[in-house]
Amino acid sequence: MSDALPTTLRAAVTLLWVETAGMAVLAAVEIFDVLTKPARYVQWAIALGVMLVLLTGLFGFLAYRLAHRRGGGRNTAVVLNLLALPVGWYMIQGGLAAFGVLLWALCAATIVLLLAPPTTRVLGLGPR
């Protein structure tokens, strides 16, 4: 068996790292806002910052595991991307259409790549 990852898995891992970076930027912006601006509900602002930091770690952990051919993270990555689709919808409805469509495209591409037969085969998740 070759050590090279199939193109579909390599692309999926790359997109997961992109999602990790995006989540890190969102977390940094939220933490900056909590520290510099008065919040109406401080506990919610802090909770959002903590959640974004935890999601950043989770996306990075999933990307790392998949890059090392550990199949256990694939389904979690698919579910997280499915959960982000409604966020894209609300972004579109809220006037951030470009970001919403970009989020949809990123999530859809990641899901398709993670469920592709070559990815499933190399992770040992398909029929034997």
Image (cartoon, helix red, strand yellow):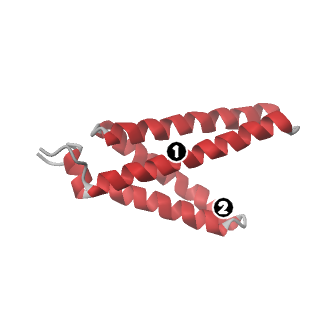
Q: Nearer the viewer, residue 19 or 3?
A: 3
Residue tagged 1? 20
| Rendered residue at 52%/34% (across/down) | 57
Residue type indicated by callout 2: Met
Q: Residue at x 41, y 51 (%)?
A: 14
Image quadrant in which the N terminus is located: top left
Identify the mark at residue 75; answer none if there is no mark: none
Location of residue 16 in the rendering, given as x and y in whole percent from the top left corner:
45, 48
The kind of residue tagged 1 is Thr
Label 1 Cα crowd, 10 Å radius (few <14 / some 14-19 / many 20+): many
Give how far across and how far down residue 128 sits, in percent: 11, 45
- Across and down, in percent, residue 13 comes to 38, 48
Q: Looking at the picture, how far across and down is residue 67, in whole percent?
A: 33, 42
Identified at 72% across, 41% down, the residue is 30
Answer with the quarter of the image where residue 27 lies.
Answer: top right
Q: Residue at x 54, y 53 (%)?
A: 84
102 or 93, nearer to the observer = 102
Image height check: is 87 above or below 70? below
The residue labelled by disc 2 is 91
